[in-house]
Image (tube, rainbow, N blue to C red):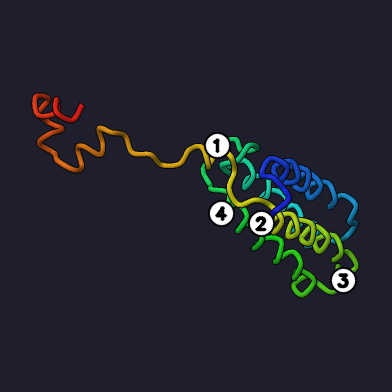
Amino acid sequence: MNRPISTRTHGMIDYAWAAAAETLPKMMDGAVETARLVRAAGAAAGVNSMITNYEAGVVRLVPMKGHLAVDVVMCTALLCSPMFLPASERRYAFVPMALGAIGLLAGLMTQTESPIEHSEAFMPSHHLSEAVADPDVARSPHLRTHLE
């Protein structure tokens, strides 16, 4: 499947989404649980973005596929949130549902491997492969001359 959103664009969407999720609860008077849910989702999205191995990542620990999996699970939960919100706050249910729909669509339309991950593919060194293949050759430099 051709995914039109690059990982770089997805990073921009992530941070904008997290900022919106932190801002929107200020407009929900009296909806304490809904506001808490939206703020927590925004914080989780921000942290998820910061630790992902893509252009917008800060620490780059989580692969892009893991990031997208977290996005799908979190946004699906936001879409289902009206079933768990108090009845008195359901008039604000469109806020987490809209954020969930936007995040889910962005996640499903984003490429699953960042250029950073693609360029950092695991390539064992020549010396490591020699040591694994024959430990005596790795320990004895005079035996290694025929390999070089």
Marked residue nearer the N-terminal end (2 or 1): 1
Q: Which mark is residue 59?
A: 1
Marked residue nearer the N-terminal end (3 or 2): 2
Q: Amino acid at mark 3?
A: Ser
Question: Which residue is pictured at 77% across the width and 48% down the height?
Answer: 17
Q: Amino acid at mark 1?
A: Val
Q: Amino acid at mark 2?
A: Asp
Which corner quadrant holds the N terminus?
bottom right
Q: Which mark is residue 66?
A: 4
Residue 85 position (above or below residue 145) = below
Residue 55 position (above or below residue 67) = above
* Circle 2/circle 1 CB separation < 8 Å: no
* Structural distance between the alpha carbons of marks 3 and 2: 28 Å
How dense is the environment of label 1, judged by Cα within 10 Å: few (below 14), some, or many (20 and up)?
few
Question: In the structure shown, which secondary structural element does the residue marked by tag 1 occupy?
Answer: loop
Name which quarter of the figure residue 56 lies in: top right
Closer to the eye: label 3 or 4: 4
* Circle 4/circle 2 CB separation < 8 Å: no
Q: Which mark is residue 88?
A: 3
Marked residue nearer the N-terminal end (1 or 4): 1
Task: Provide residue 27's location: percent of width, then percent of height.
Answer: 90, 52
Q: Is residue 130 visible?
A: yes
For mark 2, what is the residue?
A: 71
Question: In the structure shown, which secondary structural element does the residue marked by tag 4 occupy?
Answer: helix
Q: Amino acid at mark 4?
A: Gly
Task: Provide residue 135's location: percent of width, then percent of height.
Answer: 13, 39
